[in-house]
Image: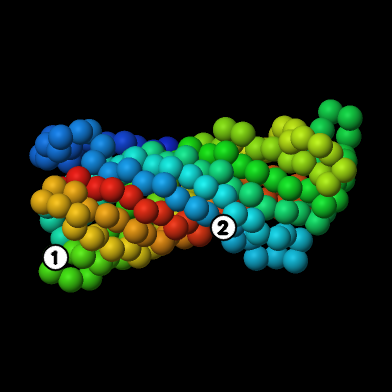
Amino acid sequence: MLNQRILQLLILVAVILPGAAFAQSKPTFFFNEINLSLNYTNEADKNTENRLGFGAAVYRSFPLNKPSFWVWGFEYDLSRRFKNLMGEENPSGYQFYTNVTYRIHSFSMPLVYRIAMDNKGRSFFALGFYIDYLYSIQRKAVSETAFDKASEMEKGDVGFILGAGMRIPLSEKLELVPILEYKHGLRDIAWYRGGLHNRYFRLAVGIRQR
């Protein structure tokens, strides 16, 4: 289990650092980038089949009009995966499930540095970390007709982000931002037989105000 002080430090950095920089830039809106995304889980084990999901996000970048800059904001993602076997501990005892689909609804707060690969920043690498709140974890076995709440699981997660993208000018003030990211959650949020990590590739297309 992650050290609580490390988690608190990450939260402090993710909140205070963007706040200090916001005072130095004044976009038309507080958030100057919005995107929609598709994700594909990446749990590389024999017990898991990865599935497609989706998400949306809003960001604030700082400083504005620089080739390299920080991005901070909020993301919503729904990720899915299929497990051949999972064991859950509940009030009635330890129960096994076979051929079960899990879906995780999560809210993330990322802090990412987009590093320009050219003088104008038209292409970039992305490197950062995020804090996750997993507000709903559901499962459905093949024999069941609807999703049900999974047994007790971790609600918090932290992880790192790696990615690459482009900035394509649409007008003097707007640009199109396609980006491919990988989000790697560090915690085993299930902590029982079968294991469950929130890890996925994320392909997003956004609009950014310069």
Residue at point 79%, 48% (across, down): 100
| Labelled disc at residue 120 | 1
Q: Position of residue 68 (x, y in %)?
A: 19, 59
**Quadrant of the rendered structure where residue 40 is?**
bottom right
**For the residue labelled by badge 2, is the local secondary structure a helix, a strand or a loop?**
strand
* Cα separation between marks 2 and 1: 31 Å
Q: Position of residue 6 (x, y in %)?
A: 44, 44
**For the residue labelled by badge 1, is the local secondary structure a helix, a strand or a loop?**
loop
Pointer 2 residue: 40
| Labelled disc at residue 200 | none
Residue at point 72%, 32% (across, down): 149
Q: Earlier in the sequence, mark 2 or mark 1?
A: 2
Q: Position of residue 188 (x, y in %)?
A: 64, 50
Is residue 189 shown above or below 166? Answer: above
Q: Residues within 10 Å of mark 1 (few under 14, many from 20)?
A: few
Residue at point 13%, 56% (across, down): 66
Q: Is residue 10 visible?
A: no
Is residue 114 shown above or below 34? Answer: below
Residue at point 53%, 39% (across, down): 106
Q: Residues within 10 Å of mark 2 (few under 14, many from 20)?
A: many
